[in-house]
Amino acid sequence: MVRRILRVVSGLAVMLALLLAGPLWMLATERVEGRGHWSTADRTSSGLAPPPGEASTAVVQLYAARAWGWRGAFGVHTWIATRQAGAEAWRMHHVLSWRRPALESRSTTTPDRAWYGSQPVLLADYRGEAAAGLIPEIEVAVAAYPAPSTYRAWPGPNSNTFTAWMVREVAGLEATLPVTAVGKDYLLDGVLAAAPGGLGVTASLGGLLGLTLGRDEGLELNLLGLSLGIDPRRPALKLPGIGRLGMAPAIKGRGAGDGDH
């Protein structure tokens, strides 16, 4: 009996060490922003959001960037930005740890700014008629988000829980969220939900134990809120903390609608 318990404890210790190896490596190699004070970190535009003169039609974009400080060793922060046709300003929707309510929707001219030193990447880019049809549905879904005043970095709900919920809620809005989007598998209602990529399923127990099988996600296993997996469609290995090693995922929405690219 004692030996069996020791084997279980040893197995759990090995699993935990493997899950934490990636985040610890990110910290040890200083691959995350955390030096100095967050208020002085880079917040300049990355150039990913088209100016009104380049794309005069409606635009919907989804972004991800490494979180600030030690949290960046584990994962990313995600957000949604929308701009009506002909408008100068964008609407930026995301969940923040330092606000109450945590959900923020605000006007900005730079939705593609660096996230406190970390450059964002595009997860989705819808333009033209496709974007114009999505924007009112996004506004309705933002207003209906069931946890606007709650933020927990681990296991959720957090910024990635919000983005994943939005993608599932708004028909036609798809995004392959990074494996480092900790909290994306925290389901606010039940244990089963559609995979954010558009075709597949996520099963999750409180964001601590789960499985995602999807066309664009491939196979992802969630253990204690950290995910690892493999994408056979666009060959890549997905590791906790480190992220995706291999072929980059497709940016959803590219080629959709009749907007100017």
Image (tube, rainbow, N blue to C red):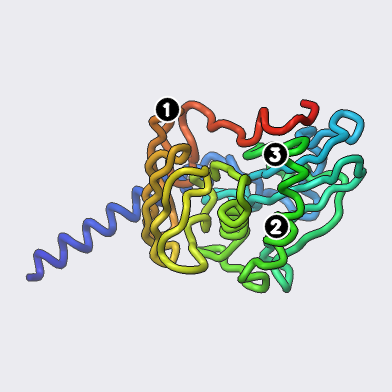
- State the CA–CA distance, disc 3 to disc 1: 24 Å
Above or below, comparing residue 71 to residue 230 in the picture: below
The foreground one among 15 and 108 is 108
- Across and down, in percent, residue 8 comes to 19, 62
The foreground one among 191 and 72 is 191
- State the CA–CA distance, disc 2 to disc 1: 30 Å
Locate the C terminus and report the quarter of the image it occupies.
Answer: top right
Q: Which residue is mark 3?
A: 119
Three-letter amino acid code of the residue under disc 1: Pro
Q: Which residue is mark 2?
A: 94
Three-letter amino acid code of the residue under disc 3: Gln
Earlier in the chain: of badge 2 and badge 3, it is: 2
- Across and down, in percent, residue 154 comes to 51, 63
Q: Which residue is mark 1?
A: 235
Earlier in the chain: of badge 3 and badge 1, it is: 3
Circle 2 or circle 3, nearest the eye = 2
Above or below, comparing residue 190 to residue 198 in the picture: below
Residue sitting at x 75%, y 63%: 104
